[in-house]
Image: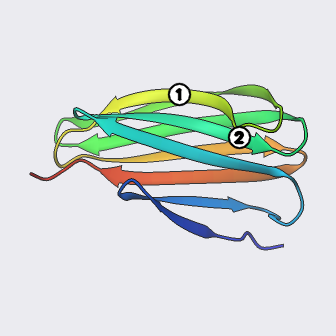
Amino acid sequence: MLARLILVLMMGGVAVVHAQDPQAGPLSCKLTAEGADGKVLFQGLVATEVEAAGQYRFEITRRGPAGSVTSRQGGSFVAKPPLANILGQMAISLEAGADYKAILVIEAGGRTYECEKTGSGSTG
C-alpha cells in the first residue's frame, strides 16, 4: 500500500508523518520542537495503543552561516500505552539565517513510521 502523507503545521515548520499502512497498526510517531533564546529543543516520541517494541533513529541537521552539523541518536525501545513515550531528546542552536531538518524513523511490527520537521531561525 502506498504511504499516506499528513502535513501538520507546527511552530513555524512543517511536520510530515507517514507510515507504510496507517490503517493497520496502532503506533504513531511525533516530533516536537520548542524554541527560546536562539535554541531549539527537540523530542522524538512514539505513541501506541498496545505495548510495542522496535528500533528508532533520530537525526537533526542544522545548516546556516556558522556551518552545518548533524546529530544522531538511535536504538531499541519498548513503548507502553496510553501516554507518548520519549525516544530521544536533542537541542541545537539556531542563529538568524540557519535552518534545520529533524527526522524520526521508527521500525516496529514489520512497519516503518517516519516523522519530519523543518524550520528556520529568524531573519531579523
Which of 94/46 is in front?
46
Q: Distance between the Cα atoms at labels 1 and 2?
A: 12 Å
> In the drawing, does residue 29 fall left or right of residue 89?
right
Q: Nearer the viewer, residue 44 or 104?
A: 44
Total marks drawn? 2
Per the rendering, the mark at residue 46 is: 2
Query: x%, y% of residue 28?
Result: 73, 50
Q: Quadrant of residue 33?
A: top left
Q: Which mark is residue 89?
A: 1
Q: Amino acid at mark 2?
A: Val
Mark 2 residue element: strand
Q: Quadrant of the N terminus?
A: bottom right
Figure check: 18 above or below 72: below
Residue in the image at 77% along x and 73% along y: 2
Foreground pick, 94 / 57: 94
- Residue at x 13% of width, y 53% of height: 123
Work out whether residue 104 or residue 29 is closer to the camera in this orientation and state it. 29
Q: Residue furthest left?
A: 124
Seen at 85% across and 52% down, the residue is 26
> Residue 53, how many percent across, how many down?
86, 33
Asked if 23 appears above or below 74 in the picture, the reply is below
